[in-house]
Amino acid sequence: MDRELCMTPRQINLALWTAATLMCAGAAAALVWAFVAPIESSPPRSDIAGPAAIAEAGHHVNDEPLERYEPIWSRSLRNLSAVAGDSQPAQTAAAIATTDPNAMPLTLVGTVGHSLALLRMPDGSVEVRGVGERLAGAEVISIDPARVQIRFNGRVVTLIKPMPAGEL
């Protein structure tokens, strides 16, 4: 009974070659149909202004000076407080951090894998730093999930993300 349901390798090859031939014939027929029966296009709408209408009206895409966008281009992409609308400069945060040279100026908010650390400054702003970057007199040495090692005042300190109150 099992012999009736099994196909020989020759029958399998014949079926595959037949399917490939039929698919090639279908692709050729679709290509011929595309040239024989092209899609009809509708006339252009008059309520939409095209490039010619814009040029006639005197408006050009490049009329705006690029210097207007300079404040956006010069913004630090790793400064979360700037995104949140906090306009306090980083120099002020560094000055706050250096008032007591032995106090740790940073707390760990979180990490993004092994690549980025979210660190809270004494003023409450959050900065994002990678390995080798400095913040408030501290250099980020290594980043692990929920743990960051920094060098501060010549010593290596490990910052651990605090557990939320509900997860104790």
Image: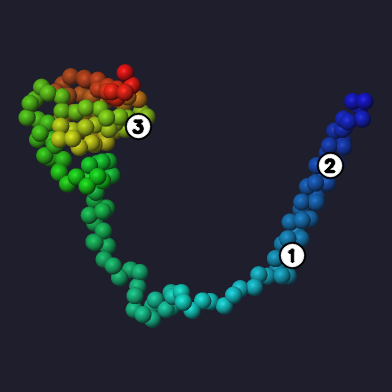
Find the distance from the CA under tag 3 to the CA under tag 1. 54 Å
Q: Return the disc, 3 or 1, that comes first in the chain's sequence.
A: 1
Identify residue for label 2. Answer: 15
**Which residue lies at the image location 72% right of the left edge and 62% below the top edge?**
31
* Residues at discs 3 and 2 in contact (Cβ within 8 Å): no
Q: Quadrant of residue 95?
A: top left
Q: Nearer the viewer, residue 27 or 54?
A: 54
Q: Residue at x 11, y 39 (%)?
A: 92
What residue would you read off at disc 3?
Answer: 112
Residue 133: where, in percent of width, then height?
24, 33
Q: Is residue 74 left or right of residue 93?
A: right
Work out whether residue 146 or residue 98 is closer to the camera in this orientation and state it: 146
- Amino acid type at circle 1 is Val
Q: CA distance from mark 3 to mark 2?
A: 52 Å
Look at the image and tell me whether residue 76 can be seen. Answer: no
43 vs 109, left or right, is: right
Residue displayed at 29% across by 25% down: 164
The local secondary structure at tag 2 comes to: helix
Question: With respect to residue 77, does 35 lie above or below?
Answer: below
Q: Which residue does the numbered mark 1 point to in the structure image?
A: 32
Q: Nearer the viewer, residue 46 or 128?
A: 46
**Which mark is in front, 3 or 1?**
3
**Rendered image quadrant of residue 1:** top right
Which of discs 3 and 2 lies nearer the camera? The answer is 3
Image height of 50 relative to 12, above or below? below
Q: Position of residue 21 (x, y in %)?
A: 80, 50
